[in-house]
Image: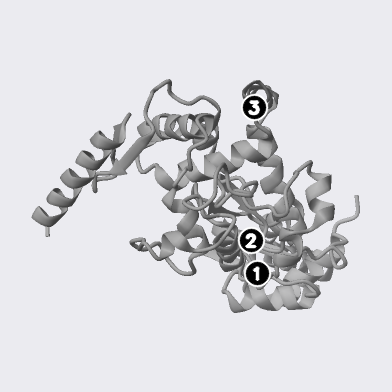
Amino acid sequence: MKELNTVQLLIITILIITATSLISINSREVDSTIITIEKGMSLNSVSKLLLDENIIVDKNIFKIKAILRGLESKVPTGKFLIEGKVSDAILFDLIFKKGPIKLKLTIPEGLQSQQLFENINLLLNKNYDFDAYFKSEEILVANNINATSLEGYLHPETYYFYHDSSPEDIITILLNEFWKKFDKTLQDRANQLGFTVHEVVTLASIIEGEAMLSSERKTISSVYHNRLRINMKLQADPTIQYIIPGPPKTLSNRDLRIKSDYNTYQNYGLPPGPINNPGIESIKAALFPEKTDYIFFVAQGDGSHAFSTNEKDHEAAKRIYKINKRKNK
């Protein structure tokens, strides 16, 4: 075998050094960093972004490697978490293969839809107009919801959204979760009670608005079931809060006289629809009420309620509450 001359050895050495540099120059330790690749950004823009965030050292080397891998036209969008020991190969895998991270959003029980939409926009840093979808007949029909809006059906749960998730995608995820929880077993139970799904969700939303303690949900439900059975007005304060703008407040006699289909102090039966988005525990409470003779309850100021079977005991419970309230001032 012919021996390599000095010039050839030098060329090979330079090539090895260059190749090693190309492999290692962008390898570094990175503190936890989230980068956002917006729609329409080019490979050059992404390379500059990574350089500006001190994730790579040389954007041209990163670009060349990406082009050689055929990634120039495959730039994704979204938020990407980058941390720890990072090389170009790791970045290519993280950004172009694994894809963007999802953002966590926990929707609490009893949240009204408008506040829910505000929370989503805040999380995603968007300004989506959800109103067009909220009362969309097409969406309601497609999701088998016999109502005039999505209020009550945007199920509270912990979700993970991409930063560029569309309003349609988000609403579909929430509605799918509702039907996942309100399964055939619960639907059969509603039929057994003679309730529609919409009536169950409406009652559940009132229970959600009243119950501070989870242990009281089914007892509160029993009061409303008993009142509905004897055709007694529900007189549910949360339905009044629903028609008053702003945060919850102490209700006045004037508030109780507001003319509205949602005023359960003025109208018999359930209101036209849910007043918030109830959780599964309130839905189950609406379907499986505790067996009681209670037809009254009053808050005790500590989250609990005093339940009564007659008006005399109810008035006594109210007096006790007022006395305790004055003592605690």
Element at label 3: helix
Q: Position of residue 81 (x, y in %)?
A: 59, 59
Q: Position of residue 155 (x, y in %)?
A: 61, 45
Q: Is residue 23 above or below residue 234?
A: below
Q: Which residue is mark 3?
A: 190
Determine the residue positioned at 58% across, 60% down.
Answer: 82
Of badges 1 and 3, the one in the foreground is 3
- Marks 1/2: CA–CA distance: 6 Å
Assign the C terminus to one quadrant of the image. Answer: bottom left
Q: Is residue 246 above or below residue 186?
A: below
Q: Is residue 224 left or right of residue 94?
A: left
Element at label 2: strand
- Outermost residue to the right: 1
Q: Are marks 1 and 2 in contact (CB under 8 Å)?
A: yes
Q: Which of 24 and 205 lies nearest the eye of the viewer?
A: 205
Determine the residue positioned at 9% across, 54% down.
Answer: 327
**First in residue order: circle 1 vs circle 2:** 1
Residue 6: in sight, yes or no? no
- Crowd rating for badge 3 (residues with CA inside 10 Å; few <14, some 14–19, many 20+): some
Q: Is residue 310 left or right of residue 150?
A: left
Q: Which residue is mark 2?
A: 80
Amino acid, disc 1: Thr
Q: Which residue is mark 1?
A: 36
- Marks 1/3: CA–CA distance: 46 Å
Residue 35: in sight, yes or no? yes
